[in-house]
Image (tube, rainbow, N blue to C red):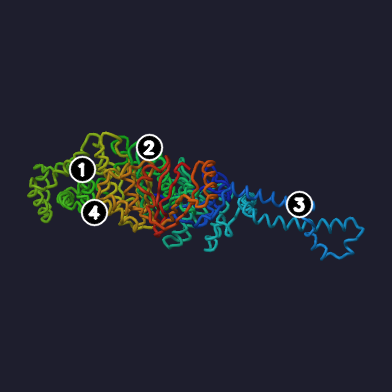
Amino acid sequence: MDSDGTQDARGTHATPVPRSRSAVPPMPSRPPGVDGSAFLTWLRAPRPEAAPGVWRFGHVPRPDEEPEQIPTRQLLSGALIAFLVGWLIWSLLSNGYLGGWWFVPFDLIVPDAWRGSDSKVGNLLLYDGYDLIVILLIMMAVGKLGRWGEVWRRFVAPRLTRRERQQEPTVPPEDPASWPALRAAGAADAAERLASDARSGLMRDVDYARIVRAWQGVRSGRHDLPTFNGAVLKDGAAACLHPSGERDLPARVARHDLVSGQVRLGTTADDPRNPYAYRGTGLGLGPDLLGTSLLAVGPAGSGKTGTVVRPLAESLCLHALAGRASVVVVGAAGTGLGPADAFDVVVRIGNPESVYDLDLYGGTSDPDEAAAVLAEALVGDLADPHPGSDSRRSTTVLAQLLGPFRAVHDRFPSVPELRQLLDGSPGALGALRTGLQGAGQESLLRELDARERQLGHPGDVAAVLADRVALLDRPAFAGFFDTSGQSRPFTLKALDHPVRVRIDLPARGHAEASRMLARLVLAQFTASVAVREDRSLFACLVLDDATGVVTPEAVRGIQRLRSGNAGAVLTLRTLDDVPRPLRGPLLGSAGCRMALAGVTPWDGQDFAEVWGKEWTEARDVTDRQIIAETPAGKALHAVRRVITGKAPTARAVTVRQVERERWSASELAHGVPPGHAVLSLTSVQGEHAPPLLVDLRG
């Protein structure tokens, strides 16, 4: 039974685990579920609603605007001076240096009989009590002037409240560890079994997310309640397992929160350029943001793979184990995208030891669909880079050959066979014609006739297609892209299930072939997610190094992913790897844009344009020399000039509203520290976060 309550699912997904702040118990060093108390602490931690990108685990909301704060040194010195002034005033009063007027209220209010009492205790309370009242009045006055209340709120109160919160952990009014939703729906026995496993330490964070996903399937009516109850009562926290049988990844390199669905990538810098509500908060990304796609640009060594791609891929694999997502990770072999046992399918193209192959035609049986995807992979980068262009001519040529071949052989051609057909080999075309005539396929014969008439004519793209196919017809790929049914080809049609896939492209020696295969995977991904039956499953393609992959059709495909509950993560070393006419559309199609430290000023200019401008307050300070008109004034100015070495001036401050770039090209190129990035976010609900300076190492 999968996480939705069915028996035939391919995978699942899990939620990242955020890091707690001082207001909640510290984050467990290991994944929740190692022991019952650690799991319950993690599960019960507060996760308030927050702005896009804020790490919600233990988040303490901040005001939208920064309050006016007096500098610490000025505040403490003012408080100390006020105390000394109050002490001085009381000393002068008590020693009679200021006269006895302050004792007049005592004489007017206190009866004479009380003042002449022989009781030492009474006199002590009476006279010393009055002195205490005067002292309190003096302290109240100087305390207000010295801002003692602000000192208390800033330095003392936070430490007291922190200790109280640490001693009394916050428990939600409705304890999620008791599974109240299941109890309310009549599944009390299943809820009690899950609560028992949670208390005893048998439940992990992935188990919780997976069972919640399965319960959502029951609530939506896709699965029945008795099946869910039976699975939970039988297996407890291990119910509704991913088909792989795995309940966690072999290792984790990032912090995840499988309740909020986030993975923590770093910390938003405490920088004046960041909105006050974001400063110092954790940065968390989840499917709600990746659903608008992410584009990360940074030079080699800036941390794209280690600090962005690897944590996101890991998070999506956890989501897959929980039945919420399917993920395809594409990158060069050996780039550290995660261990092989963290994936269900590992396709090592060009490696003879690879268990899985890659379906060149995307698992479709429609020749026209296969031709469109294959044409995009082969010559998509040669199409006119303007957004309105496409590769229809190449698609037509391939369709004229794929349709007849499939009709005769009940399969698509292998790479060598396709190369022969595109080259116009008389033997291959003649055999295909004979087969069509024997099968009486008149319409397909006309397709083949049209292809033969176009051979060798000016403008025929078959020769270009044949040259590109020749890049795959190499000894290194001899055992791949098999269409005879003797291998185990992976097709992206499997994204209907929560599956974890890693595709390793040839590391070196086949750079052009690697870029062509990356375009193939992206084209198949955008085509497959558009026709999925279960769109409640989030699908994501993680492409480490999208050099040569961005084409007009790819940009259009990325723009369509959002409506299909899918997204893509693309990384580039520089935007120069994208044709100039496509840079704007690419940045516009990605809802989340990241510029890492070290980008060029030209790349920074593109990001600055897409992030736009904002109204800000500009302060202009002008120093004007003071001209003395009287002899005494001139003498005073002369003495001041001798002492300070400067002429007396008067300062004038002008405040005005101006429109400025959020981040200029120069700031992006030279003002982003190493290990940092500037990131803007857009959620699938349309919420925006302005460009944020983020420390990816935090």
The earlier-in-sequence mark between 3 and 1 is 3
Q: Tag 4: residue type?
A: Pro
Disc 2 marks which residue? 301
* Badge 4 element: loop
The earlier-in-sequence mark between 1 and 4 is 4
Cα gap from disc 3 to disc 4, whole angstroms: 84 Å
Q: Tag 3: residue type?
A: Leu
Disc 4 marks which residue? 387
Cα gap from disc 3 to disc 1, whole angstroms: 104 Å
Q: Tag 1: residue type?
A: Ser
Residue 514 on image: x %, y %: 27, 40
Disc 1 marks which residue? 414
Give the class, few, some or many, for how many residues have Cα within 10 Å of label 2's Cα (few <14, many ≥20).
few
Task: Check contact, mark 2 vs mark 1: CB within 8 A.
Answer: no
Q: Tag 2: residue type?
A: Gly
Cα gap from disc 1 to disc 4, whole angstroms: 32 Å
* Badge 3 element: helix
Mark 3 or 1, closer to the camera: 3
- The number of callouts visible is 4
Task: Check contact, mark 3 vs mark 1: CB within 8 A.
Answer: no
Mark 1 or 4, closer to the camera: 4
Give the class, few, some or many, for how many residues have Cα within 10 Å of label 3's Cα (few <14, many ≥20).
few
Disc 3 marks which residue? 92
Give the class, few, some or many, for how many residues have Cα within 10 Å of label 1's Cα (few <14, many ≥20).
some
